[in-house]
Image (tube, rainbow, N blue to C red):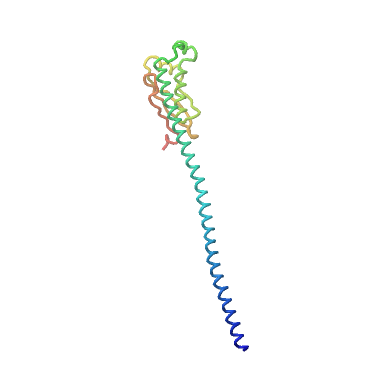
Amino acid sequence: MLETLDLILLIAITGLLWTMVSRQSRLENRLAQLDRLDEIRGQISRIAEGSGDLELRRLEHVLIDIRDGQKRLEERLLQMAEVTHQEGGLDAMSTPSSREAERPTGAGLSERIVNRLLAMGYERIMVLTPFEELAGMLGESGEGDVQVEARRAGAVCKGRVAIRGGVIAAVELKGSHAMFP
């Protein structure tokens, strides 16, 4: 009888062990699925970080577009101002003689040249041609070359601004690094 009792006890313990092993196996399968959640969390955080960079890049492109549009607008306004100056101005109160009395001879052309170069991205602009020669370009023929010096991105640029018919026709400036081989 003791042997049968031992046999029954052995079968019961084996059944209990079998049940525990199968439950442990099912539990490991469920935990393996939870491990996948960590992978998903990592992927979601990478996507979230990437979208932040994407928004910054979009904003940067929009700002670049606005800057380029502003440059085009400024250049167009300068062209319109030059044409207006050439045609005698739109302001009925301001006659050419009163405008000449307001500033020295040739200063208006010099101012237009400086404005054009500023719009093109130059800085520290110096008009090297004397005002007397500038006045001559506006008076008789309305043509000539104005010598200028400016800086762009820290480099010294020298060259000329071509005046045709009293209007800026061309700007030719070269950086000092382009002048020497």
Image coords of residue 179 (percent x, y) = 42, 34
Image coords of residue 86 (percent x, y) = 40, 17
Residue 68 relative to residue 9: left or right: left
Seen from this angle, which residue lies furthest front? 1
Residue 81 position by quadrant: top left
- How many marks on residues? 0
Q: Is residue 31 above or below residue 118?
A: below
Task: Classify the position of the C terminus by image quarter.
Answer: top left
Q: Is residue 55 above or below residue 169?
A: below
Measuring 49% from the left and 35% from the top, which residue is drawn there? 153
Task: Classify the position of the N terminus by image quarter.
Answer: bottom right
Q: Is 47 or 15 nearer to us in this picture?
A: 15
Seen from this angle, which residue lies furthest right? 2
Residue 116 position by quadrant: top left
Measuring 50% from the left and 13% from the top, which residue is drawn there? 102
Q: Is residue 132 above or below residue 119?
A: above
Image coords of residue 117 (percent x, y) = 45, 27
Image coords of residue 31 (percent x, y) = 55, 64
Q: Is 54 or 95 nearer to us in this picture?
A: 54
